Amino acid sequence: MSSIEVLDTGLIYRNPMPHLRHGQKSFPSLVALSDGELIRAMDISESMSALDRRSYVCRSSDGDGTWSEPV
């Protein structure tokens, strides 16, 4: 049986305008590529049942130090 080890925690996405948009994040996924790059996928919407839900991807090439803007 395999186990998951938490190596670090941190912030990947911060809502740039929390006073204007709520921004519910859900369904996070993380993949480590063989070259060391990390890819993080998530859905962002106004609420869990909102119709504006979209999937986004962020990338980190420095081992989780910094993340690209969601695209």
Image (cartoon, grey):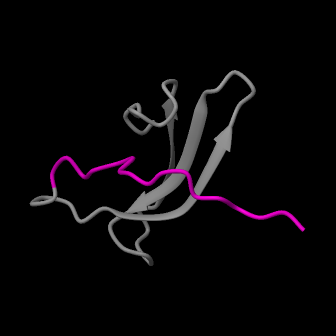
What residue is rendered at 42% in x and 39% in y?
A: 70
Magenta-colored stretch includes residue 14 = yes
55 vs 11, nearest the viewer: 11
Residue under the point 19% across and 46% down: 16
Left or right: where does residue 6 sit relative to residue 10? right
How many callouts does the rendering have? 0
- Quarter of the image with the C terminus is top left
Q: What secondary structure prevails in the magenta region?
A: loop
Residue at point 24% right, 65% down? 22
Image quadrant of residue 5? bottom right
Q: Is residue 6 above or below residue 59?
A: below
Q: Position of residue 33 (x, y in %)?
A: 71, 31
Query: Extreme bottom residue here?
Result: 49
- For residue 27, above or below residue 68: below
The x and y percentages for residue 50 are: 40, 72
Q: Which residues are magenta?
A: 1-17
In the depicted structure, whether residue 31 falls above or below residue 53: above
* Depth check, front residue: 67 or 10: 10
> In this rendering, is residue 52 above or below 58?
below
Quarter holding residue 21: bottom left
- Examine the structure image and report whether residue 67 is included in the region drawn in magenta: no
In front of the other: 10 or 58: 10
Residue 48 x, y percent position in the rendering: 43, 76
As drawn, the residue found furthest toward the left would be 19
Q: Seen in the image, is 18 located left or right of residue 47?
A: left
In which quadrant will I find the N terminus? bottom right
Could you tell me residue 32's position as x and y percent? Answer: 67, 38
